[in-house]
Amino acid sequence: MADLFARAADSYFQDLIHGQDPSADPSQQEAKQREAEIRNTILAQVLDQAARARLSNLALVKPDKAKAVENYLIQMARFGQLAGKVSEQGLIEILEKVSQQTEKKTTVRFNRRKVLDSDEEDDY
């Protein structure tokens, strides 16, 4: 099973590294389906059921954040940084890390315009 995982991940990432975009193929749907199957296979191997359910719920609400977490998990699995299956608590910690990295800081600036009033000029 680990060998299947390694081959699928290597194949997927080698295609991306060498600039072979699966969406550029004439069989666009088939390539997208293959990519989704590979991602799902890898995620099924590294996440337990509760973590997978949480990630699925996140994908419904914030697809971009879920994709970032999936990519992070796949990279960690590819480089052997995951000891076993990631639990729901472990996924929550990863979500917090990703949230801190992608956190947008909002600042509000007030540009106050000085209004010229004819009364002010008369006082001087």
Image: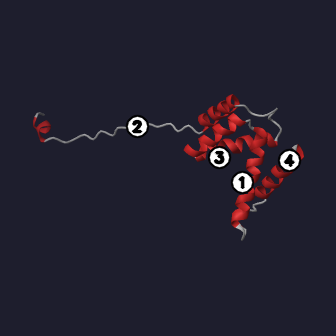
Residue 96 at x, y percent in the picture: 62, 32
Residue at 66% in and 30% down: 93
Does 50 appear above or below 35? above
Residue 57 at x, y percent in the picture: 60, 41
Residue at 69% in and 39% down: 52
Q: Nearer the viewer, mark 2 or mark 4?
A: 4
Type of amino acid at the residue the image marks with label 2? Val
Residue at 74% in and 49% down: 39
Residue 88 at x, y percent in the picture: 68, 31
Name the image quarter holding residue 76.
top right
Q: Secondary structure at mark 1?
A: helix
Name the image quarter holding residue 77.
top right
Q: Which of the two residues, 83 or 20, is positioned nearer the viewer here? A: 83
Looking at the image, is mark 2 or mark 4 earlier in the sequence? 4
Q: Secondary structure at mark 3?
A: helix
Is residue 55 rendered to the left or right of residue 16? Answer: left
Disc 2 packing (10 Å; few <14; some 14–19; many ≥20): few
Residue identifier under label 2: 108
Q: Nearer the viewer, mark 1 or mark 4?
A: 1
Q: Quadrant of the C terminus?
A: top left
Type of amino acid at the residue the image marks with label 3? Lys
User: How many angstroms separate mark 2 from mark 4 (CA)?
Assistant: 48 Å
Residue identifier under label 3: 67
Is residue 106 rendered to the left or right of residue 42? Answer: left
Q: Nearer the viewer, mark 3 or mark 2?
A: 3
Residue identifier under label 4: 6
Type of amino acid at the residue the image marks with label 4? Ala
Disc 1 packing (10 Å; few <14; some 14–19; many ≥20): few
Q: Secondary structure at mark 4?
A: helix
Q: How is the image coloured?
A: secondary structure
User: How many angstroms separate mark 3 from mark 2 (CA)?
Assistant: 30 Å
